[in-house]
Amino acid sequence: MLKLLFLAFISFGGSLPAKGLYEEDTDFVQILTQETFKETLEAQEEKNQFWIVEFYASWCGHCVHFAPTIKEFAKEIKDWGKLVKLGVIDCGNPDNGDICRENQVHGFPTMKYFLPNDRLYDQKENTLEARSTAALKEEALKIALEKNVAHENGLGRFLSLEKIEGAAVNDVVEQNSEDGIFTALVAAPSDMALADGSTMDLLADLTSLSEISIRLTDEASVKKWPETKGAILLILEKDAVKMKIELSDATSRAEVLELLSSTLKTEKYSWKNVVVASSLKSAAAANDDAWAKYDQSKVYLQDIESALLQLLFYDVSSFPLEGEALSAIKKYVKIVSQLYPPTSRSIDVDLRNLSSELETVSKIRKRKEWIGYLDKAGLTKLQGSQPTLSYAACTPSVENLRGYTCGLWTSFHLFASLASDEQASTFAEAMSEMILNHFSCLECRENFKKEIEQFPLAGVTDHNSGVKWLWELHNSVNARLAGEPSEDPKFPKMQYPSGEECVFCKTADDFQMEETLKYLDFHYSKENLVLADGEKMVDNDRMEDDADEVVEAIKDKPKWMVEHEKELARTTEPPKVDLKSFAHERHEESRQTTLEDLFKELHKIGYDANEIDHILNNNPHATLEDKIRMLKKKVEAFLIYRKSKMARENQDMKIIDELSKDPEIPLSHRTVLFAELAKMNQIRKEVEEEFQFIGFSVLDTYFCIFLWTASTSILLWFYCGFNCRCCYARRKPIYRFQRM
């Protein structure tokens, strides 16, 4: 038991969350997570604040491209902390998935704002469309003005973004004089350009200074104070001019702020982290050369699997699913289920199960319902309902580059190369619809739409044209993104394949199409696939529409399993088996599966404590996980076989005897087999006694049983009593045997 408790700490699969695109200390943003999002926005001191939050995905190329804009915007408004605060959250981190979905985020990047005392996260209307620093500032200030944010968050006494004139100016100055605070009057048009912003930006900057009441006015309203003409900033102490600064397109906001702070000796607000640091999850330190251990001349099925799971579990996020969106999923899942390489992980079978489940579905209302379909199909057994994805050859040299997008392109090329002439156009169409409807990088969707206008789907008519179409499309995307911030320095966007990868594919002028197609077909062939540890290819003749075909390949299959698979291939109405009962459960706290979880699952499918201890004590620790997985698969296959139509209708004593003697099948299941075997032996004994009673020897009995099952004509011949030693004299037929 001590060994078991010790081994429970050993886990496998998954990966730590990737580092996001921002650094809190240098980028002036609040990094939010699943745990800190509501905790921060609903804190007593923050709930009346105006917040802007960027929802992004660290793998999204457009988000990487947009990150410098956000950093510049954050730097510009770092002094506006009393008016507006900026947060970011990485929805590409599976741990943050729930809060991103609750906020109705279906594409990246998405900018949402939350008004003071308004924390309705499921609203879709509170989004910012601006995509430049200047536009973001303008939109933020416009919302603050229209929604009267300054009044709502308690700044009303110190700031009004609305212009005041004439007597209203005198009233404000008089009130501030009584309260003993400075008055800042910005007498200039609201849209006047300064060296590093606008008049409105300067007004927001001034909120960082304590005990100053700020108002926007016009030049005419400040003429009562001497030597004031043109655009000007007046600082009044009571009714006297303390400072005046002329404003022009050469005026620097930063210099104005510094001058005021030093002259007035007033406390200046500085950017600070409002998120509890201890609650932030730190990502694992990046291994700079992790990518180097993978052979880039190979295709790793780990990349294909991770990209597929990310597409199905995370990119499918806009609910309800119906119409074109649901149709796109159905098409893609169906064709990919036919093209996915069949391995012992049975992902192709899971996809066929999913395709079958979705056939009659017209609407999926919520994500929970969608995950239910994925679970029922068997896809959650791979990495749980919130996959922690990891990549192989698509591992980036710089964190957050490549990864998912690399895996997605690799999978597209693999499926295109495995498609037959008949499947090529179907795959190209299904792939395009899936990207246009569900790929969560919104900018990428629009760019992809333009790409397929340049490379029409009508050009895909057979295998070769399908491979060529995808190759041209991919190289067009590479040409557009070359040199962009999303480009991995170790894997630059280039026209693929390079001369090093394929010597004969490229001349000085152009690609040799015949050689290029040969290279692509080989590179993305099953022969060039690298499988995960313990994974292996299996027979490609598995029945495509068979929900009973979930028996994974294991070493040295017993005869009963081989016969079962052959029978399944001939079955026209295969029984449907719910795999949910086989306890593919995910460890919810660590989001990883431990050996303790595996032993619990073995217990659930029939192994008792003594059998589990025997497994633990008689297998080397180095191979223990593989052994447990193999046993689990074997027992699941056995249970499915026992539920199958073949096992119910064609009980074979030899197979049952073989199963009952197999020590790797739990005793609890073999006990049932012992009872069945005893019952069948009793029936056989009674039949023998019946024959012997009427004079048959044991040899005669078995000979007659053989004849009885061999041919209809021999049966008729036997029934007529010909050569029957009991009735030979009277030549009467025997129709049944009974005791006298």
Image (cartoon, helix red, strand yellow):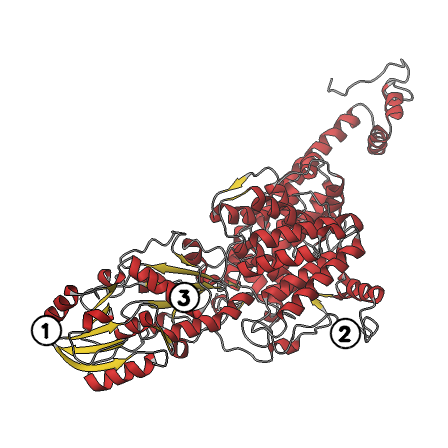
Visible residue check, residue 10: no
Q: Secondary structure at mark 1?
A: helix
How many numbered callouts?
3
Q: Nearer the viewer, residue 697 or 476?
A: 476
Q: CA distance from mark 3 to mark 1?
A: 35 Å
Nearer the N terminus, badge 3 or badge 1?
3
Residue type at tag 2: Glu
Point 80% across, 70% down: residue: 510
Q: CA distance from mark 1 to mark 2?
A: 77 Å
Nearer the N terminus, badge 1 or badge 2?
1
Q: Is residue 190 left or right of residue 171?
A: right
Q: CA distance from mark 3 to mark 2?
A: 45 Å
Q: Nearer the viewer, residue 440 or 208?
A: 208
Q: Nearer the viewer, residue 236 or 295?
A: 236
Residue beneath disc 2: 501
Q: Which residue of the protein is positioned furthest toward the left in this rendering?
A: 178
Q: Is residue 622 left or right of residue 84?
A: right
Residue type at tag 3: Leu
Query: Label 2: how many residues lie within 10 Å, few (<14), some (14-19) or many (20+)?
Result: few
Residue beneath disc 3: 136
Q: Nearer the viewer, residue 605 or 444?
A: 444
Q: Position of residue 257 (x, y in %)?
A: 28, 81
Q: Nearer the viewer, mark 3 or mark 1?
A: 1
Point 79% across, 26% down: residue: 691
Q: Quadrant of the C terminus?
A: top right
Residue type at tag 1: Ser
Nearer the N terminus, badge 3 or badge 2?
3
Using the image, tell me which numbered label, if any, was put on residue 177.
Answer: 1
